[in-house]
Image (cartoon, rainbow, N blue to C red):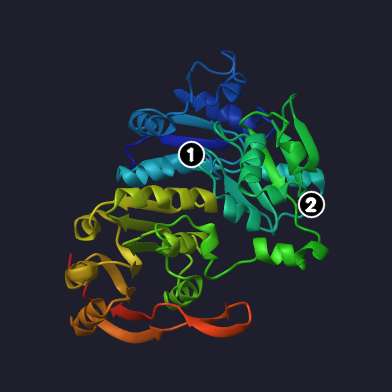
C-alpha cells in the first residue's frame, strides 16, 4: 500500500490484559486529537492526561473504522485495544476496511500479549499445539472442527461467552460431557476467574463475553477406543444415517469418498456444489477443509434439508443458494473446485458457464447416473476444459437373503467425469 504523506497517523496500541500508562503510551496520548477504545480502557485515561476526545468502540466497529480513516486525513488518532490489536482485534477490522475501501492511511501497530497467551502462561502450559477459534461477532460456531482438535482455544463473544460455547458443544456432541476443560473470564481485571473441570460443569458457570474456553487433549487410552474412532476420527464419506434426505436421495458414502478424493481438495479456496440435494458432498468438503463452499439447489424444501444437515454437522463455512444453477453461477465467487450433482439437459451450458467463472487449473467433477446424462457429458467438448479422467463407480456390499444366504448387492452405477480448466483461458 502506498502511504499518503498528507494523512496524519493512526496509532493502534495493544494494551495486553493489564493496562499500564507507560511512558510511550503517555507520549502518544499527548499527540493525538481522538482516542478510541473500549469503555473499560478509556476509563483509565483522565482529563489530566489529555484533552483529546474519547470515543468508545461499539458493536458497530466497521462503521467506526471508516470514521477513523476519514478523521485521520486531518488528525492524529490513537486506538486502544485489549490483548493484541491484530489478533481478532480492532487492528484487523481497520486493515480490512482500508482494503475494502481502497483507502491509504499511515497505520502504526504496537504489539502486546494476547489473552490466550497470558492464560497459558498462568497455567504453565505450552501453547504451540493449540488451535485457535473465535466467537467474536459470530452467529454460529464450527463445532465439528472444534471438538476434533487436540487442544482448541475458543475466544468468547457477546452471543457466545465461554459457558454458552460449552453448552453449544454439548448440544452438538453430548459425548464430550466429561472432556476436561478450562474457563477463564476477565483476565487481568479484579473480576478475573479461572475454573477447571469437565465441559458439563463449565456449562453452568455464567461468564462475560471477554472469556475463553479451552478443551484439553484426550488421554491416550481414550484415543484407541472403538467409540472414539467411530465418533471422532476423520472420515471420507460420512454415514448416510447422519444426513436428513429426501426419499433416500443421497450420494452413497463409499461413492462420496471417491469423489472427495478425486477433487484433490486444497486447504483453502472456493468450491461450488451444484445441484446440492442433501448437501452431503459440499458439507463434507467444508468439514474437512477451510474452503468456502457454496451450494446451489433450486428446490426450496431441499434448502431446508441442507440447512438442517449443516447445523447437525456443526459447519459454518457453507452457504446455500436457492435458485437455478445457470442463473446462480454468475453470482458466486470464482471457484477452485466444482462438483456437479445435477444439471440435466442444461449440463453443456453449465460446464460452459463454469469455465468463465473459475480459476486456472480448477477441477470440475460431474456425476451421471442416467444414460442420458452419461451420453451428454461424454459428448461435451470445449478446448478450454480438458477431460482428464472418466470413472465408472460400481460398489457392491454383502447382504443377507432370507436370514440364511448372502449375496453382493450393487448400488447404482455412477459415472464420474473429471475436467480440468486449461491455463490462461479465463476470459472475464
Helix, strand or loop under label 2: loop
Helix, strand or loop under label 1: loop
Percent across and percent down for residue 24 are: 61, 33
Q: Is residue 114 visible?
A: no
- In the image, 28 versus 172, the foreground residue is 172
Residue plotted at (33% across, 31% down): 70
**Left or right: 321 as drawn, with respect to 347:** right
Percent across and percent down for residue 15 are: 62, 34
Q: Is residue 386 visible?
A: yes
State the residue position of label 2.
125
Q: Quadrant of residue 184?
A: top right
Q: Of the numbered discs in the image, which one, if any, rests on residue 139?
A: 1
Percent across and percent down for residue 130 are: 68, 55
In the image, residue 365 above or below residue 168: below
In the image, residue 334 above or below residue 2: below
Q: How many marks?
A: 2
**Left or right: 331 as drawn, with respect to 95:** left
In the image, residue 233 above or below residue 94: below
**Left or right: 252 as drawn, with respect to 376:** right
Residue plotted at (34% across, 48% down): 301
Mark pair 1, 2: CA separation: 30 Å
Amino acid at each position: 500500500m502506498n502511504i499518503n504523506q498528507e494523512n496524519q497517523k493512526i496509532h493502534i496500541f495493544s494494551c495486553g490484559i493489564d493496562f499500564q500508562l507507560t511512558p510511550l503510551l503517555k507520549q502518544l496520548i499527548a499527540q493525538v486529537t481522538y482516542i478510541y477504545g473500549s469503555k473499560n480502557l478509556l476509563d483509565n485515561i483522565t482529563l489530566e492526561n489529555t484533552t483529546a476526545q474519547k470515543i468508545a468502540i461499539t458493536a458497530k466497529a466497521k462503521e467506526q473504522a471508516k470514521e477513523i480513516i476519514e478523521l485521520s486525513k486531518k488528525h492524529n488518532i490513537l486506538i486502544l485495544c485489549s490483548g493484541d490489536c491484530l489478533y481478532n482485534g480492532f487492528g484487523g477490522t481497520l486493515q480490512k476496511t482500508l482494503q475494502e475501501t481502497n483507502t491509504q492511511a499511515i497505520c502504526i501497530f504496537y504489539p502486546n500479549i494476547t489473552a490466550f497467551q497470558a492464560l497459558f502462561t498462568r497455567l504453565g502450559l505450552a501453547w504451540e499445539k493449540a488451535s485457535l477459534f473465535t466467537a467474536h461477532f459470530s452467529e454460529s460456531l464450527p463445532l465439528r472442527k472444534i471438538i476434533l482438535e487436540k487442544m482448541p482455544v475458543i475466544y468468547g463473544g457477546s452471543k457466545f461467552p465461554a459457558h454458552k460455547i460449552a453448552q453449544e458443544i454439548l448440544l452438538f456432541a453430548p459425548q464430550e460431557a466429561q472432556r476436561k476443560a478450562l474457563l477463564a473470564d476477565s483476565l487481568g481485571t479484579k473480576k478475573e476467574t479461572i475454573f477447571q473441570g469437565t465441559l458439563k460443569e463449565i456449562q453452568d458457570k455464567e461468564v462475560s463475553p471477554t472469556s475463553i474456553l479451552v478443551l484439553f487433549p484426550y488421554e491416550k487410552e481414550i484415543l484407541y477406543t472403538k467409540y472414539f474412532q467411530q465418533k471422532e476420527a476423520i472420515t471420507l464419506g460420512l454415514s448416510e444415517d447422519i444426513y436428513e434426505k429426501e426419499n433416500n436421495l443421497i450420494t452413497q458414502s463409499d461413492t462420496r469418498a471417491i469423489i472427495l478424493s478425486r477433487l484433490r481438495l486444497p486447504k483453502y479456496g472456493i468450491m461450488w456444489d451444484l445441484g446440492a440435494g442433501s448437501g452431503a458432498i459440499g458439507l463434507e468438503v467444508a468439514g474437512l477443509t477451510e474452503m468456502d463452499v457454496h451450494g446451489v439447489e433450486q428446490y426450496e424444501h431441499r434448502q431446508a434439508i441442507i440447512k438442517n444437515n449443516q447445523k447437525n454437522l456443526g459447519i459454518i463455512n457453507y452457504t446455500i443458494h436457492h435458485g437455478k444453477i445457470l442463473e446462480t453461477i454468475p453470482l458466486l465467487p470464482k471457484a477452485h473446485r466444482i462438483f456437479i450433482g445435477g444439471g440435466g439437459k442444461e449440463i453443456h451450458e453449465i460446464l460452459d458457464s463454469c469455465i468463465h467463472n473459475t480459476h486456472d487449473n480448477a477441477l470440475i467433477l460431474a456425476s451421471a447416473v442416467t444414460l442420458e446424462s452419461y451420453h451428454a457429458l461424454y459428448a461435451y467438448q470445449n478446448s478450454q476444459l480438458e477431460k482428464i479422467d472418466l470413472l465408472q463407480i460400481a460398489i457392491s456390499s454383502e447382504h443377507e437373503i432370507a436370514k440364511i444366504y448372502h449375496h453382493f448387492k450393487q448400488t447404482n452405477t455412477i459415472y464420474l467425469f473429471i475436467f480440468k480448466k486449461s491455463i490462461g483461458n479465463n476470459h472475464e
